[in-house]
Structures are given as structure tokens and as C-alpha cells.
Amino acid sequence: MKGKRRAHHSEYQQEIKRMIENYLSNDSESYINTKYYLKDISYGNYSKWLMDYVAQPFGFNNDYDIIDAYVYGMLVTLLYNDECISFSCRTDSCAEPDKDKETNENIINSAHPDIKASVRNNKEDGDGSIEIGGICFPLEIGYTDSCTTFNHLWRSSKLVRFPYNTNEITFMVLKQGIRLVTNLSENKLAVGEG
């Protein structure tokens, strides 16, 4: 990965990356398909809207690697197969840089009277949290990568994204009974019944 990406990667993200590397090294068909997918991403053949919400990389797609492409594909599959529900709320303006915590809180809180945002920029746990209806969602603002998005869904089954250049926050929730599971003995990631 190139230096423009987030320097930190949590233990969970590193575990996800190791499992995918092992899986792809043992499954040549998946590796080949993922390489084609990565090529499409590098040539700009993707939905910009979907890319922003799932993984809006810093510097855009120039530093996307095969692991990011594979995880991005898994996340898109979850959304297209209706295994992950998403819905959006409009905000008064677009996300500001990470250092503007109070401004971002105010922008997010403007989306709906029941939303209470807490922006703290703790990169290990995301950029903060949003509480709505007694449910707390991890929050990612601005640039992120597919492994970070996957990590939130894996750990808590939910996430709110507020990418740059849009005036919407998007909630993502895995459907009831669906959970992301890992089979460490086979080095595979999968969607399973919970």
C-alpha cells in the first residue's frame, strides 16, 4: 500500500488482510477474478456513488490493491444481494476535514432531530459514533478503505458513512440473521446465518 492511505490498520484489519491473502493464494480463480476487478477499478469502471460510500480512498484509486478490491467486491455483493440494508439522510452541507470535529458533528446532527453525533477522530474505532433510536453506530467520515468498512460491519454489523463531496450520511446495517463470519482454519471470509 502506498503512503497516502491511513497509516494505521487495526489488528482486525490486519487479520482480514491476512485471511484474504491466504485465500487468494490458494484459489486461483478468485485471484484472477479479483485482478480483473482491480483493473476495472484502476480504469475508473465502477459506481462513484457506491465507491464513496463503501470505500472512498485518499487519492482515489491509484493506491487500491488486490485486497481492497476483493473486500470492496464482497461489500458490493452484500449490498446488491440485500444482505446489507442501507438508507441515507440529507445533511445541510458536505463533510469537512477530520480536524473540524465540531463542524462535522453539527452537520450530521442537522440531518434528523433524532440523530446525535459524537465525532472524536479515534482512528482505531472510527471517526466517532451516531446514536439514533437508542442504537449506536460507528461513524466513518471522509476517506476510508474497504477493509475499514468491512471491519465495522464485521465487528458491529452496522456503520454510518459520511464521505467527502456529498451532503448525505448513509447508514449500513447487516440484515437480522446475517453476520460476517470467518473460518480461520480454511482462511475464508463468508456471509453466514447468525
Image: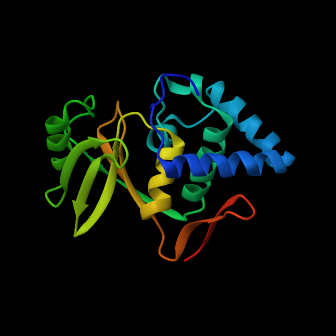
**Numbered-mark total:** 0
Q: Residue at x 53, y 45 (%)?
A: 147
Task: Using the image as rendered, state which of residue 5 and residue 114 is in the foreground.
Answer: 5
Quarter of the picture containing the C terminus is bottom right
Task: Using the image as rendered, state which of residue 161 and residue 110 is in the foreground.
Answer: 161
Coloration of the structure image: rainbow
- The part of the image, by quadrant, that contains residue 98 is top left
Quarter of the picture containing the N terminus is top right
Left or right, residue 56 beside residue 190: left
- The part of the image, by quadrant, that contains residue 144 is top left
Q: Residue at x 74, y 41 (%)?
A: 34
User: Residue 32, how many percent across, how many down?
Assistant: 82, 40
- Can residue 76 be seen in the rendering of this structure? no
- The part of the image, by quadrant, that contains residue 187 is bottom right
**194 shown above or below 90:** below
- Can residue 3 be seen in the rendering of this structure? yes
Left or right, residue 140 beside residue 187: left
Q: Residue at x 71, y 29 (%)?
A: 39
Task: Using the image as rendered, state which of residue 189 and residue 51 is in the foreground.
Answer: 189
Q: Residue at x 65, y 40 (%)?
A: 67
User: Residue 51, how many percent across, how many down?
Assistant: 51, 38
Task: Please identify the residue farthest to the right as the structure is shown.
Answer: 28
User: Residue 38, how many percent across, how many down?
Assistant: 69, 34
**13 shown above or below 36:** below
User: Residue 93, how many percent across, how many down?
Assistant: 22, 35
Left or right, residue 177 beside residue 64: left
